Image: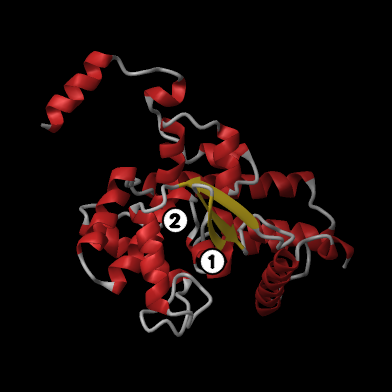
Amino acid sequence: MIPFEAKAKSTAAAYKAENDKRNAWISQKKLPVDESSFLLYLLDRAKQIGSSALAKISAAYQTANEGISAIGASFVSDIIKSKRREESLLKKTVVEVTVEDVQKITMLAMKEDNPERDRDALLAILSFNVMLRASEAAEIKWAGVKQIDGMIEVHVEKAKKDQLRLGRSSYFNYEPGSDADILMCRWRLRTKGKCPYVFSHLNSSKKLSKGAISTLSTKMLAAIGKPGATHHCFRRGGVNHMRRIGHSMEEIQCRGRWRSAAGLKAYLIDVPTAQGCLQSKGAEADDEDDDD
């Protein structure tokens, strides 16, 4: 049990569940409980699940069995790499969400006296600026959102990579009296303290689930001409916005709660300003003419 006790509780529970599924499959097939049966199980599961789920099955097996043979490890690696290549061919085009898109959502809310638009615009603002995952947004409480000294602090109680469950705080600049400030105050007044969570149902009795937040995000982005965009596009968009305006990789990694820079790099797109190139004044003038 020591290898499991060394893991975070949620990780240990997930690994135990995966091992139980594997053992049940092996028992059903009347196979010996050994490495070869594990490899056959992994091949069978590869027909139905993705590379990340396959990697979790492998990690669960190795935790319970103190590793794997060199030949077995090579075979597992080949299965997962093959699945990743298959996934890359089927990968959908990522829809880019920009700060201008968030402003469009915000303006729609500011033009109407509509509780649903207020809540959804606030979701867009926080998700973009703090680069929230849908699971993190679902857990944010009013007690963890503070407005101080021209900043908004958002305390993420259950960050994905926060294995010790200590919570993480992320900050972004805002102006008192700005649209973000008004929307936050307006939505807070509408909820009247009925729910401790920021993102709740319109009757304020219950918090929104991760799935509900994802659905709302897809709907609001489609409404401004971004069909196919998901809640995670806010997180990706926030990364590239910070990069464009000159923030360092370390600052972005810290605000977005990435455990490693390698995980963050997958979100970056190639833009001149991210590589130290500045637009010429002539190019900026051309852009302004195009806008006119």
Q: Is residue 285 left or right of residue 76?
A: left
Percent of width and height locating residue 272? 38, 22
Q: Nearer the viewer, residue 47 or 143?
A: 143
In percent of width and height, residue 40 lies at 64, 61
Inspect the image, locate mark 2, and give the three-letter code of the amino acid beneath it: Leu
- The kind of residue tagged 1 is Ile
For the residues labelled 1 and 2, say whether their Cβ atoms are less than 8 Å apart: yes
Horizontal relation, residue 232 to residue 136: left or right: left
Is residue 227 visible to the viewer in this orientation of the structure?
Answer: no
Image quarter of the N terminus: bottom right
What number is the disc on residue 126?
2
| Label 2 residue SS | helix
Q: Percent position (x, y) of residue 99?
A: 34, 44
Mark 2 residue crowding within 10 angstroms, few (<14) / some (14–19) / many (20+): many
- Identify the residue at image location x=61%, y=59%: 159
Q: Earlier in the sequence, mark 1 or mark 2?
A: 2
Determine the residue positioned at 75% across, 68% down.
9
Q: Which mark is residue 140?
A: 1
> Where on the picture, by quarter, is residue 212?
bottom left
Please name whichever residue, 166 or 228, is drawn nearer the observer in this view of the structure: 166
Q: Quadrant of the C terminus?
A: top left
